[in-house]
Amino acid sequence: MSDPVLLPLPTPFATRTVNCWLVEGSPLTLVDPGPDWEETAIELDAALRMRGLRVEDVEQVVLTHQHLDHVGLAHRVKDRSGAIVVGHRLLHDFLLDLPESMRLEDDYQADVMRLHGVPEERIQELYAVSELHRRYGGSVVVDRLLDEGEVVSLGGRDHRVHYRSGHSPTDTIFVDEDARVAIVGDHLIGKISSNPVVHRPLDRPAEIRNRRRALVAYLESMRATAGLDLDLLLPGHGNPVEEGHGALVAERLDFHDRRKERIFGALADGPRTAHGIALGLWGDIADRESFLTLSETLGHLDLLEDEGRVRQDEEDGLVRYSAV
């Protein structure tokens, strides 16, 4: 048994790299093997060779969540090695036919954007980009389906499974309780606040007017993680978070509280769409990154609705928010 080893792998996305974690021992485990991109596959081969290993030696692939930069290459690793794939049970149907799942995801997100004021031209541009990104993931069978509280062995070390919905509907962290180390994917990243993205729900009907409340779930998940006895977080991007993860969570909670107040202030002049609020706060960024900034805005509006401070009204297929 040994400590997880970082294998930074290139991606074709804005994040540039993703952290694949190698856990040597039995079963020899890769956590998040990256996207299905030739440069990623070449670099993974080279990184394993540096440690005297081959992809064919991998016995287990563990997935932290559904995003292509983390799961896309899993099917190629499985085909070459015969490894079992392990992940939260919500990943099973999503990854069983990944192209179709991504199409449904894109359709759902486009409908959410329409409902909240993003212009159709921008929606079509973003849809086309996402459609191109589908090439970076292949379908794979998740052999072992995990639930909250289960234990899975990575390289001979027992890891407790904790479901941490927020950044996506399938975020899962794996905690080595003896070593007080957690592999956390994109749930908590040291230098970047993970975006609580609006995703198609995987456990209930995909209704855009009863969407999954990503930020509400994410704040609950972060509070739960803050309560764990941990010394080290191994994230999906960037450097490990050494000690003080409770302070990091407190910093993130404060960040979202301040952003919530900014969004409430944007309603002072009357009702606005969520996209209109985003444009007022972020300008050109909200135009270029319409979906991500819309997700951020809707998350904070959900918090304000829970506090009884805003309400939403729909007219002619368009939702506007007002201060109460």
Image: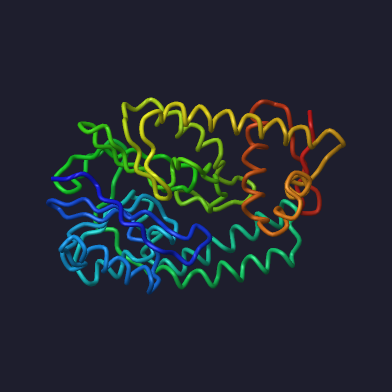
Residue drawn at x 38%, y 45% as measured from the top left = 235
The vertical placement of 258 against 286, above or below, is above
Give the side of residue 229 with respect to residue 122, left or right: left
The vertical placement of 163 against 23, above or below, is above
Place of residue 182 in the rendered image (x, y in percent of width and height, measured from the top left)? 31, 38
Q: Quadrant location of residue 324?
A: top right
Labels in figure, total: 0
State the residue in front, 96 or 207.
96
Q: Work out which residue is located at the far front of the displayed protein and give it.
A: 50
Place of residue 40 in the rendered image (x, y in percent of width and height, measured from the top left)? 37, 68
Residue drawn at x 30%, y 41% as measured from the top left = 174
Residue drawn at x 53%, y 53% as measured from the top left = 200
State the residue in front, 163 or 290.
290
Q: Work out which residue is located at the far right of the displayed protein and give it.
A: 269
State the residue in front, 193 or 147.
193
Place of residue 113 in the rendered image (x, y in percent of width and height, measured from the top left)? 68, 56
Give the side of residue 39 with respect to residue 306, left or right: left
Give the side of residue 170 with respect to residue 289, left or right: left
Q: Quadrant location of residue 93?
A: bottom left
Color scheme of the displayed model = rainbow
Q: Quadrant of the N terminus?
A: top left
Place of residue 66 in the rendered image (x, y in percent of width and height, measured from the top left)? 42, 55
Give the side of residue 196 with respect to residue 62, left or right: right
